[in-house]
Amino acid sequence: MSDKEKILLFWSGGKDSALTLHYLKKDPRYEVIGLITTINRDTNNVKFHGIPEALLVEQAKMLKLPLQRIFLPGDCSNEEYIDHVGKILSIFGKRGVRKIAFGDIHLEDVKKFREDMLKPLEMEAVFPLWGKKTKDVFKELMDTGHKAIVTAVMTSKLDSSFLNCEYDENYINRLPEGIDPAGENGEFHTFIVYSPHFKMRIPFSKAIAVQEGPYLVMQVKEP
């Protein structure tokens, strides 16, 4: 019988959640028992990422982990988010799950929001990437063999030439001054197409780019 503590991971389908999973799998304290994803029910995609439910399911199958989907309204307020997510997490809490992992790196307000959300549920937030330099996060992602494409850019920060690109060293070197190498300030979002924990690269095709709030989003879909 395993003495590891069961932990759930919030999964966006992007690079930070993928690297977080890599860390958790190496950590002898935890057993990752599943992924949780919030999906915009109006578009059936991860908000601002352009990743559809079908490809999230494909990622989870590759990882051999169950995927808990939470469907939220497109204009979801923080209160609605806490209500919807809290109801699902409370179910896992009744099963003895006390740890929830996130891929945040250094945004204090986001960290506090997550911790405050979990406190009434008697759960603890775990942040394996917290406090790391974002250049180091990028290097670890590359060194561990992860592959990602950029599926969304904040149009006030980056133009369309930074969309639909491999997230690699060339991409980092092209970024304008002041843009975080990991997009931690929301400058861009990614879709993980290969992980050392996948048996193969995720097949996908590209759709047109659409404006979604402050982002230009390249919607990806099943091939």
Image: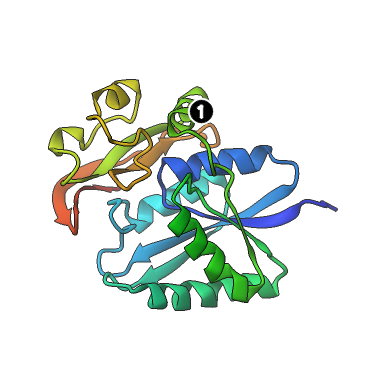
- Name the residue nearer the viewer: 79 or 32: 79
Q: Is residue 50 above or below residue 36?
A: above
For mark 1, does the 10 Å Cα neighbourhood hold few (<14), some (14 to 19), or many (20 or more) residues? few
* Coordinates of residue 202 in the picture (x, y in percent): 39, 39
Q: Amino acid at mark 1?
A: Glu
Say left or right for 130 vs 185.
right
Quadrant of the image occupied by residue 187: top left
Q: Is residue 20 above or below residue 42?
A: above
Quadrant of the image occupied by residue 124: bottom right
The tally of labels here is 1
Q: Is residue 47 above or below residue 118?
A: above
| Residue 118 visible in the picture | yes
* Coordinates of residue 188 in the picture (x, y in percent): 29, 43
Q: Which element type, helix, strand or loop, lies under badge 1?
A: helix
Say left or right for 195 vs 177.
right
- Name the residue nearer the viewer: 189 or 2: 189
